[in-house]
Image: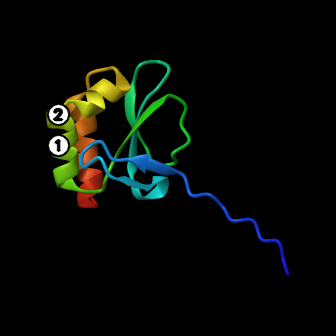
Amino acid sequence: MENKKIKKVPMRKCLGCMQSFPKKELIRVVRTPEGEVVLDATGKKSGRGAYVCKSEACLKKAIKSGRIRANLEVDIPDKTVEELAREIAGE
């Protein structure tokens, strides 16, 4: 018998629907050490991260409830919200 290692899939919680998903299925928003809020397509940028489903409803809920702002501990610029909306829409 081969001794195959089972790879653990990192799970993260969407701040809109509060469901856990594999990290790669979510969009990561990061507050960089410089205090800038940006999208992180690679999932590897340093800084404080927050995750949202690729769903418009989840994005709206996460912003309206203030969960993204609370999680990143900064206000989210409108430009970043628009970028997120475009990313979700697949533009």
Residue furthest toward the right? 1
Q: Amino acid at mark 2?
A: Ser
Question: The residue tagged with tag 1: helix, strand or loop?
Answer: helix
How far from the left and from the top, in percent, is residue 56? 19, 53
**Residue depicted at x 17% and y 43%:** 61
17 horizontally vs 73: left or right: left
Q: Amino acid at mark 1?
A: Lys
Q: Quadrant of residue 89?
A: bottom left
Q: Residues within 10 Å of mark 1 (few under 14, many from 20)?
A: some
Q: Quadrant of residue 4?
A: bottom right
**Residue depicted at x 47% and y 52%:** 23
How far from the left and from the top, in percent, is residue 8? 62, 57
How far from the left and from the top, in percent, is residue 14? 33, 47
Colouring scheme, one of rainbow, by chain, secondary structure, one colour: rainbow
**Residue depicted at x 41% and y 58%:** 25
How far from the left and from the top, in percent, is residue 87? 30, 53
Q: Residue tagged by mark 2?
A: 65
Residue furthest toward the front? 1
In contact (CB < 8 Å): disc 1 and disc 2: yes
**Residue depicted at x 16% and y 44%:** 60
Q: Residue tagged by mark 1?
A: 61
* Residue 59 vs residue 65, the one in the foreground: 65
Q: Quadrant of residue 31?
A: top left
88 horizontally vs 10: left or right: left
The C terminus - image quarter: bottom left
Cα–Cα span, label 1 and label 2: 6 Å
Q: Is residue 46 above or below residue 91?
A: above
Which label belongs to residue 1?
none
Question: The residue tagged with tag 2: helix, strand or loop?
Answer: loop
Q: Residues within 10 Å of mark 2 (few under 14, many from 20)?
A: few
The N terminus - image quarter: bottom right
